[in-house]
Amino acid sequence: MSNLRNSVRLLGHITEPEVKKISEKKKVAKFSIATNESYKNDKGEKVEDTQWHNLVLWDGLASIAESYLHKGSEITVEGKLTSRSYTDKDGIKRYVTEIIVSELQMLGKKAAV
């Protein structure tokens, strides 16, 4: 049950992955995933709600993202939720919430062979 303490699962379409090589053996990919939900409001009108979530993939998963993922790819991910802060160039403290991805599954159509 300890795995359930900080676990996130998402399914959606992604932005273009940005991959950086940090060292000879370390690579990181960052991009966002959109999750969509629709519901009816009090007036019975259909409302579409899209949420964007920041993803971070390391090493092997970053290589997969670099080789196989592109803007619009549909994926499902599992990982842990993290928060961090930094000071921007104007001296303003900013906060970021990200999902550190531990599992990735590509969805959609396979390429023709």
Image (tube, rainbow, N blue to C red):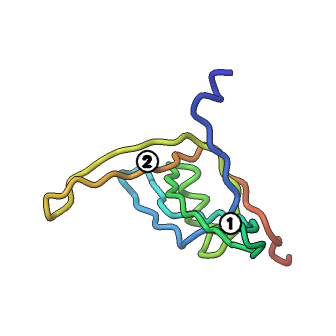
- The answer to whether 21 appears left or right of 47 in the picture is left
Q: Decide: few, some or many residues near mark 1? Use Cα within 10 Å; few <14, some 14-19, many ≥20.
A: few
Which of the image's four quarters has the C terminus? bottom right
Residue 80, compared with residue 111, is above or below; it is above
Counting every numbered tag in the picture gives: 2
Label 1, label 2: how far apart the Cα atoms are: 35 Å
Say which of 36 and 28 sits in front: 36
- The answer to whether 112 appears left or right of 63 in the picture is right
Residue 51, compared with residue 4, is above or below; it is below
Residue 49 location in percent, x, y? 64, 68
Dividing the picture into quarters, in which one does residue 83 lie? top left
Of helix, strand and loop, which one carries label 2? loop
The amino acid type of the residue labelled 1 equals: Asn
The residue furthest left is 91
Residue drawn at x 52%, y 45% is 100
Contact between marks 1 and 2 (CB within 8 A): the answer is no
Q: Which residue is mark 1?
A: 36
Residue drawn at x 36%, y 53% is 22
The residue furthest right is 113
Residue drawn at x 67%, y 47% is 9
Q: Which residue is mark 2?
A: 25
Which of the image's four quarters has the N terminus? top right
Q: Earlier in the sequence, mark 1 or mark 2?
A: 2
Say which of 63 and 41 sits in front: 41
- The answer to whether 86 appears left or right of 69 in the picture is left
Residue drawn at x 49%, y 53% is 56
- The answer to whether 64 appears left or right of 46 in the picture is left
Of helix, strand and loop, which one carries label 1? strand
Dividing the picture into quarters, in which one does residue 65 lie? bottom right
The amino acid type of the residue labelled 2 equals: Lys
Say which of 70 and 25 sits in front: 70
